[in-house]
Image: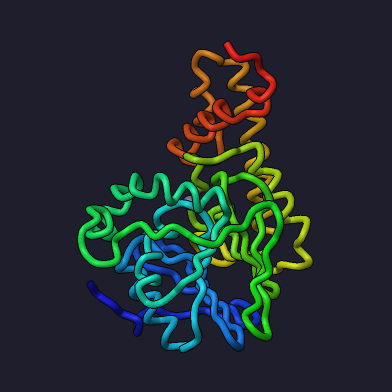
């Protein structure tokens, strides 16, 4: 395993708050420093990412750590076991994400084959699935780090069923609810609800002026506004296609503002989770 903390560069994004881009999937990990505790946001795609991240954290602080997972995708939580082995007791996530990681985390191993083969095969140290043990449900949770408070909250289903937002000063860690430099991923998403979540993030733009996406460069609320309009338009286009071409709704794919794979998933997830589904009569 290569630990190269010297090449890992923290970027200061707000009061007591830093971001580090991890190799492989380019996940944005966060570090938030209090006087008594420090919080690490997401742990990467396995022990390799986590070792780099941990070394980079320890170059900045010796404080005890808490870990926060933004959602239940392996590139964001597969490094948990490494942190737990270094004495981290509390790993926070949304309750739905914590359950998903505990029940199905193993199933995601093949996804990181190219990034962390040990994690993919489950062989080697710190490759076990370490599910979060602290949960956020419908009410926000304030983590008091000493002289600085971090707020963990859920604005509804979006990229996944259990997306957690992390507010630190004027910085908002949005996980993969916001994507910069790549198309959003819709595989596990709730598109109709996702657009509402983006609307809520825009609505609190006076609180959070810097939004850290799960991958890519930190952005401002205008970027989120653009993503919101794009998704709204895509959903309109898809709705029309699903009604007009009910047999071959994939005809809409070329006109959507995303890549073909993301567009296909968007349509599939709209059909699977759409607003009409809840009211339809089971057959
Ligand atoms: Zn994700």
Residue in the foreground of this view, choosing between 230 and 203: 203
Q: Residue at x 30, y 79 (%)?
A: 4
Q: Residue at x 71, y 44 (%)?
A: 196
Q: Position of residue 139 (x, y in %)?
A: 71, 56
Q: Residue at x 59, y 30 (%)?
A: 273
Q: Quadrant of residue 172?
A: bottom right
* Vertical arrangement, residue 165 with respect to residue 56, above or below: above
Query: With 264 as the anchor, is 242 left or right in this view?
Result: right
Give the residue at the far top of this rendering: 283
Query: With 223 as the anchor, is 30 left or right in this view?
Result: left
- Picture quarter with the C terminus: top right
Q: Quadrant of residue 165?
A: bottom right
Query: With 22 as the anchor, is 31 left or right in this view?
Result: right
Q: Residue at x 67, y 81 (%)?
A: 148
* Vertical arrangement, residue 41 with respect to residue 184, above or below: below
Q: Position of residue 200 (x, y in %)?
A: 74, 52
How many marks can you see? 0
Q: Position of residue 218 (x, y in %)?
A: 57, 67
């Amino acid at each position: 395993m290569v630990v190269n903390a010297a090449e890992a560069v923290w970027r200061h994004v707000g009061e007591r708050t830093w971001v580090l881009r991890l190799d492989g999937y380019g996940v944005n990990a966060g570090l938030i420093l209090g006087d008594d505790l420090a919080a690490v946001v997401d742990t990467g795609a396995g022990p390799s990412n986590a070792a780099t991240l941990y070394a980079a954290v320890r170059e900045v602080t010796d404080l005890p750590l808490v870990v926060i997972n933004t959602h239940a995708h392996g590139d964001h939580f597969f490094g948990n076991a490494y942190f737990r082995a270094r004495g981290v007791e509390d790993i926070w996530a949304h309750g739905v994400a914590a359950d998903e990681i505990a029940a199905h985390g193993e199933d995601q191993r093949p996804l990181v084959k190219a990034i962390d083969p040990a994690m993919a095969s489950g062989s080697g140290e710190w490759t076990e699935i370490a599910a979060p043990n602290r949960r956020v449900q419908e009410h926000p949770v304030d983590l008091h780090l000493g002289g600085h408070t971090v707020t963990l909250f859920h604005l509804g289903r979006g990229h996944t069923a259990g997306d957690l937002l992390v507010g630190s000063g004027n910085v908002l860690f949005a996980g993969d609810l916001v994507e910069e430099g790549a198309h959003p991923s819709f595989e596990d998403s709730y598109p109709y609800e996702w657009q509402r979540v983006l609307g809520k993030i825009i609505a609190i733009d006076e609180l959070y002026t810097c939004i850290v996406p799960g991958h890519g460069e930190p952005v401002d609320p205008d970027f989120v506004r653009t993503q919101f309009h794009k998704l709204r338009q895509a959903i309109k286009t898809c709705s029309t296609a699903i009604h007009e071409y009910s047999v071959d709704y994939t005809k809409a794919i070329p006109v959507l503002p995303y890549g073909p794979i993301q567009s296909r998933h968007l349509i599939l997830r709209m059909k699977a989770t759409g607003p009409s589904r809840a009211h339809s009569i089971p057959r």
